[in-house]
Amino acid sequence: MTPSKISSSRKKKIKKLMSMMNKQNQRLIPIAPPLVEMMDLVTTNEEIDYLLQMGTGLFDYKQAAKASNMSDEQFQSFFDTLKRKGLVHIEFDSLGNEEYRLNAIAVGWYEAMMHYNMGKPVEKAFSKKFDEYFKFFHKLNLAPLRNIQNVALRPFVKPSQDAAIMDPAITGKSKRKTIPINTGVSSPETMVHPTYYVTDLIEEFGNKNAISVFPCVCRHSNNLLSSPCSHEMPKESCIAFGGMAKAWASWGYGRNISKEEAIDILKEVREKGAVHSVIHERDDYRLPAMAICNCCWDCCGILKPYNMGAIALKYKSSFIARIKDDANCKGCGTCAKYCPTMAMTLKEKKAVLKSDICIGCGQCAFQCRQNNIELLPNERMVFLPVLKKSEARVVA
């Protein structure tokens, strides 16, 4: 499917809408041409005009319907489509009533739109534009500009996700060893909703019957573009919590699961090299968790563009890796293979840690065959600078 040329008036409206969407989450998504073209592919003029009119505030269904000038039946269908497309986000008040607001670009619109597109003619074109979006920034990866970005962006890039681990007491399906951690973690006063173990989230939401699982849209997008996941992750690998997740599941995007099934999924993806990225409401790590994205570095919409030298990242991390004894390292390279940020490397056939870019995900410690890597509690923000093109391990 080839997109038609966007008129200047429609392009202006799309850019305005996406600027409004950027105000809904802490994460800022740069509005580059491929992103505008993605929105153009999947929205009508009527939808854009309506959303521009509604603005960025919170509103109830009556307010939403009144602004439409449609009949009740027409508006119900129209508004349902906006929700399913991820253009409108559902929230719940203290009594459990639905409220609505314009969704963020990501996490929000992009993920829901990918689910909505599945099986439709537009899904491959939409995925191709998403791939072009990161290639757009990769083309800007030139030495002077990259150096300026890495200095200028460091204080402004927001940590929109946690790097968390499973409870060390829970072993994997293959009965692999647990991750060695030499002491407990104390919660710093500044952290409102600290997340150390994803299994705590599973326990909390499982007791409320509020866990859903979804196919990973990033891996689905890669498959559409003939670039399958090298880690061979299971199709269903994204875990989400609460009312919004239930709504998505009710639309057929995923399904509700028990906490036992959620633990089994976490075990499997950990075995295969996934990083447990905890996503928070409004992409603000100070707010409650809403999902666990089990990310691999060659597919994930967060880690892939970093590994291709397209973007900088910042993670809120609770641990840091430590190599116990150089003499015990066999130089097999397993830790480097699974490290999502290339913090683990080999030098003279020994593992070496670049501690400043270690996000404490635990993969190196979990995968080490010699049990020679451990995690130490270390609460901090980790800035991952734009890589040089020569350092990138994902081909743009």
Image (cartoon, rainbow, N blue to C red):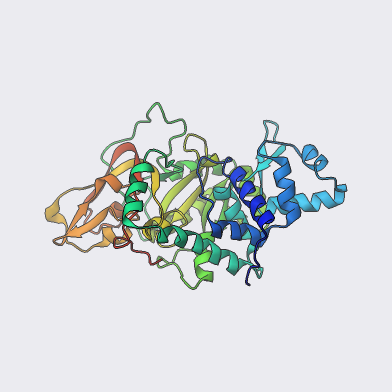
Residue appearing at x 14%, y 53% in the figure: 326
Is residue 37 rendered to the left or right of residue 132?
right
Depth check: give the residue in front, 108 or 241.
108
Image coordinates of residue 64 in percent, x first then y, are: 77, 41
Image coordinates of residue 382 in percent, x first then y, are: 34, 43
Counting labels gives: 0
| Quadrant containing the C terminus in the rendered view | bottom left
| Quadrant containing the N terminus in the rendered view | bottom right
Is residue 142 rendered to the left or right of residue 374?
right
Can you say whether 17 is above or below 143 in the image?
Answer: above
Residue appearing at x 31%, y 49% in the figure: 179
Residue appearing at x 24%, y 59% in the figure: 369
Image coordinates of residue 80 in percent, x first then y, are: 75, 51
Question: Given the current orientation, which residue lies at the most extreme right position?
Answer: 71
Can residue 348 be seen in this snapshot?
yes
Question: Given the current orientation, which residue lies at the most extreme left position?
Answer: 327
Depth check: give the residue in front, 131 or 370.
131
Is residue 154 rendered to the left or right of residue 183?
right
Image coordinates of residue 118 in percent, x first then y, are: 63, 65
Can residue 116 be seen in this snapshot?
no
Question: Given the current orientation, which residue lies at the most extreme top position?
Answer: 189
Q: Residue 143 falls in which quadrant of the image?
A: bottom left
Is residue 217 rendered to the left or right of residue 81?
left
